[in-house]
Image (cartoon, rainbow, N blue to C red):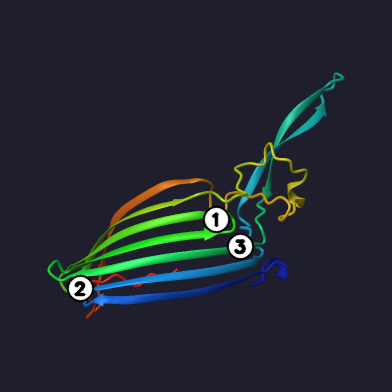
Amino acid sequence: MRGLNNTLGKRSYDLFTGISQILDKDTVISANLTLGYNHGFLNDPYKVIQRTDIVTLPDGSGGTVDIPVVNTYPENRPNSRFRQVLQMEGTRFFQGANGALDAVLRFSHDDYGILSQAVQLEWRQGVGEKFEVIPFCRYYHQNAASFFHNTLDGLRVVNPRNALRRSFPVSARPRWCPGSTPPQAASGWRWIRKRKGCSPSPPTCTV
């Protein structure tokens, strides 16, 4: 993949493996592992970080006056990233209720220092022959990247534009890790139309 002016590039490699097991006619479980490595330009060109610089000017009476100036700089992420994602899923169909329960547990980690966990429960209720109602709840949590900063104020960076990624990685809010993320819970429901001949079992999740 080439970037702006054909000078910035990024390469991505992903290895995926998984296993599934049918326990009985109504139950299936699976586990998937994904290893991913990215190298090259990993910054988000639309993300910036700010720093307040002090400009000293003469006040016209022999003294000086300090004027704060807020400057913005592009983010500066490391130029490589290695991530690991483990996802486990189980699905059980209940014929008497004409519905299926799907449970997903997902762990993710990378060498940015980001660790995330997610749990999702989903009930797929068949309504007639053509529709499903799908209430669900989801819990998600992750921490911040090790190099995350809200601002460059107070950091020892002479010129952020020339800061080396390896020696001092600084970043605005990364697209995937916008700082410390408190635990988040979500719930809701969906209404979908089933395809003819399909039972109300959840689709296979891939990562």
Name which quarter of the figure residue 50 lies in: top right
User: Where the C terminus falls, by quadrant?
Assistant: bottom left
* Residue 65 drawn at (x, y percent): 78, 25
- In the image, what residue occupies the spot 48% across and 64% down? 85
User: What kind of residue is marked 3?
Assistant: Arg
Q: Secondary structure at mark 3?
A: strand
The kind of residue on which mark 2 rests is Lys
Look at 67% across and 41% down and name the residue there: 152
Quadrant of the image for the N terminus? Answer: bottom right
In the rendered image, which residue does mark 3 sit on? 81
Question: Is label 2 in a helix, a strand or a loop?
Answer: loop
Q: Amino acid at mark 1?
A: Arg
Query: Is residue 206 in view from this perspective?
Result: no
- Residue with the mark numbered 1: 175
CB atoms of marks 2 and 1 within 8 Å: no
Q: Earlier in the sequence, mark 2 or mark 3?
A: 3
Q: Is residue 153 left or right of residue 112?
A: right
Q: Is residue 179 above or below residue 80?
A: above
Which residue is at a point 59% across and 56% down the rendered structure image? 112
Identify the secondary structure beneath mark 1: loop
Residue 181 spot, x, y in % from top left: 48, 47
Marks 1 and 3: which is nearer the front?
Answer: 3
The outermost residue toward the bottom is: 197
The residue closer to the viewer here, 13 or 22, is 22
Q: What is the number of the mark on residue 130?
A: 2
Along the line of sight, which residue is nearer the eye, 116 or 133?
Answer: 116
Q: Nearer the viewer, mark 2 or mark 1?
A: 1
Cα distance between the residues tagged 2 and 1: 38 Å
